[in-house]
């Protein structure tokens, strides 16, 4: 099953033989599989060799700014807030809230594991736009994110089968 970002899940076709065969379409360049990192759960892997500075995702990720989460909201989405978000100031969201802004990246930013050292993928900057809607007069102006096309690039040469790892900044 191919997604629009080149990230695919494998499917099984047992009609060829009794042994299960995983098949990944040729256009898929990234897949999820068990991580090689300790306690890494699932990881994101490249199926093709990549050169340094090569863009990894065909279409950039959207960036969803989560502004000033109150304790009740944050408790209800604690897994999202603590496991999958980025500091808003890293993704142009620092002017979106009054006190605190987190940025969710539902794509490579949420799928790949992070490391403080030895990471091999870096992010760029999102583009900003309003999709042609007037923020003052269009009823749809607040129904979408203004930030998108966030691309990820290889920070070093990668071999086919390498697990992608993002830079993880420890806070606290």
Image: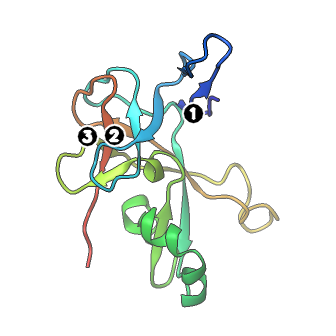
Residue sitting at x 34%, y 52%: 40
Q: Is residue 49 above or below residue 111?
A: above
Q: Which residue lies most toward the top here?
A: 16
Task: Classify residue 162 by image quadrant.
Answer: top left
Q: How many marks on residues?
A: 3
Percent x, y of residue 167: 27, 53
Percent x, y of residue 100: 45, 80
Q: Which residue is mark 2?
A: 164
Q: CA distance from mark 2 to mark 1?
A: 16 Å
Q: Nearer the viewer, mark 3 or mark 1?
A: 1
Among the two numbered marks 3 and 1 on one chain, the one whose residue lies closer to the N terminus: 1
Q: Which residue is mark 3?
A: 120
Which of the pair 86/84 is nearer the observer?
84
Q: Secondary structure at mark 1?
A: loop
Q: Which residue lies most toward the bottom here?
A: 71
Q: In the rendered structure, find residue 167 and report the number of the disc placed on it.
A: none
Q: Which residue is mark 1?
A: 9
Q: CA distance from mark 3 to mark 1?
A: 22 Å
Q: CA distance from mark 3 to mark 2?
A: 6 Å
């Amino acid at each position: 099953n191919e997604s629009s970002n080149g990230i695919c899940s494998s499917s099984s076709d047992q009609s060829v033989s009794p042994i299960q065969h995983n098949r990944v379409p040729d256009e898929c360049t990234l897949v999820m599989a068990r991580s090689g990192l300790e306690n890494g759960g699932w990881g994101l892997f490249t199926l093709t060799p990549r050169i340094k500075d090569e863009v990894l995702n065909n279409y950039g990720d959207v960036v969803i700014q989560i502004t000033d989460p109150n304790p009740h909201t944050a408790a209800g989405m604690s897994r999202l807030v603590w496991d999958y978000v980025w500091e808003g100031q890293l993704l142009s969201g620092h002017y979106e809230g009054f006190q605190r802004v987190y940025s969710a990246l539902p794509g490579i930013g949420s799928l790949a594991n992070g490391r403080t050292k030895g990471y091999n993928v870096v992010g760029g900057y999102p583009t900003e736009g309003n999709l042609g809607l007037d923020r003052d007069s269009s009823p749809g102006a607040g129904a979408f994110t203004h930030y998108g096309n966030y691309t990820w690039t290889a920070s070093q040469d990668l071999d086919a089968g390498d697990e992608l790892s993002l830079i993880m900044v420890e806070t606290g």
